[in-house]
Structure formats: C-alpha cells, structure tokens
Image (cartoon, helix red, strand yellow):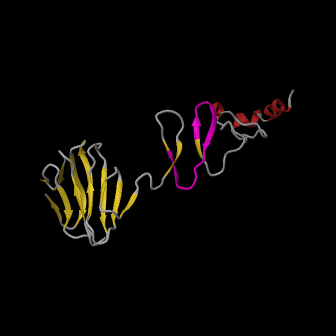
Amino acid sequence: MSSLSSSIQKDKAALLTGTAVCSIGTIPLLPAIGGTGNTSLTAHALLLGQGTSAITALSLGLNQVPLGQSSGDPIAANINAAVNPVVNQNTSSVTMAPFTTYEINNGASLVTLTIPTTVALGTWFEIVGQSAGSWIVQASSGQTITLLGVTSAAAGTVAPQTAAGYIKIECTTANTGFTIISCTGIVNIT
C-alpha cells in the first residue's frame, strides 16, 4: 500500500467522526472535494473560482481594480487619469472630450469649450473655472443645453456669471440634448 493510501486508511475513523484535519503533505486537494487545487496561494492576490479546476489568482498592482468581462476571468485594470482625465485648459478654445474635466487656466483670456457633434447618451463634461478670463460652453449645430427647465437656443451657449464658476453637463439625448446636472453660482443660458 502506498504511503498516501496508508495515511488515508489510518485517518478513516477521524474522517468519519469529523475530527480529521485535511492535510495530505504537499498534494493539493481538488476543488471537487472542497480544496483549492493548489499547494499554495499567491500572497495578496484575489482568488478566482474555476468550477472544478484549480483556483487561479489575480494579482493587482498599484491603482488597479478587477474589471469583469463578458466571458472569462476578470482582468486587472488601471485606475488613472486616462479613465476620467483632468485637463489644464490654458488655450482659448477646445472641442471637449467625453468624460473629461477641464480646469480653466488661461489667465485673462476667455476659453470656449465646444460640445462635439457626436455624443453618446450619458456622456458628461465638467468645467472648473480657475482664471479671470472665464469660460463659455458652445453647443454645436442642432444641440441644446437645459438647466431647470430653461433650454438654450440651438447651438446656444452656457457661461458662468463669475469666472470661478463650475458646471457639469450630461448628454440626455444622444448627440443633441444636454442637461446641466450640477453647477455653482449663476449660469447664463442663451
């Protein structure tokens, strides 16, 4: 009889009474009988079940989170400025990028932020005034911007009454309709 079989036979009584400790040297216990299928686990990693196969580990680096996929295991995804970038806007005009915060820093010059012509539902843009020159949001042709039931003209504008104003605009109708979902101070809509 092999030493493994001998060891199992000797502990049969303990297994039947529930007092046995599941330890078989360095042989991993299979998931089908409650084990992980591994002899050791990766330190500080997330464990991913694999059905009846051995558990796998997902190691995360600095500023990473698990990101689910439509099939298969999650992947390690970076959290960084590329996810929701913050732009130090120090030029006079820009066509805004989706899910981006613009910090206005153009001295005494006005900054014009244009909404792109193609915008998916739920996309947002955020503007934070930080310089004396202030800013204005320009809607593209056929687009309107609404705040508390007041809607701009097609291709209208939105501007703060003071240069330090803040605004967050969300697309509520793909490509054409936008709503101010957050702002500070008085906002002028034309």
In this rendering, the answer to whether 43 lies above or below 87 is: above
Instruction: Please give the name of the residue rendered at 81% of the width and 29% of the height, measured from the top-left corner.
Output: 5
Q: Residue at x 71, y 41 (%)?
A: 19
81 sits left or right of 137 in the view: right
Is 51 colored magenta in this rendering?
yes
Q: Position of residue 150 (x, y in %)?
A: 12, 55
Question: Where, quadrant-wise, is the C terminus in this rendering?
Answer: bottom left
Q: Main secondary structure of the magenta part?
A: strand
Q: How many marks?
A: 0
**Camera-nearest residue between 153 and 184:** 153
When asked about the image quadrant of residue 25, the answer is: top right
Q: 53 or 115: which is nearer to us?
A: 115
Picture coordinates of residue 90, whole percent (x, y)? 35, 65
Residue 167 on image: x %, y %:
26, 60
- Figure quadrant of the N terminus: top right
- The residue at 65%/38% (across/down) is 36
Q: Classify residue 35 by image quadrant.
A: top right
Q: Give me the residue at 45% from left, 56% from top.
A: 81
* Residue furthest out toward the top: 1
Task: Indicate whether 159 appears above or below 53.
Answer: below
Q: Is residue 91 magenta?
A: no
The residue range painted magenta reads 48-66
Residue 115 screen position, x and y as percent: 26, 51
**In this image, 72 relative to 161: left or right?**
right
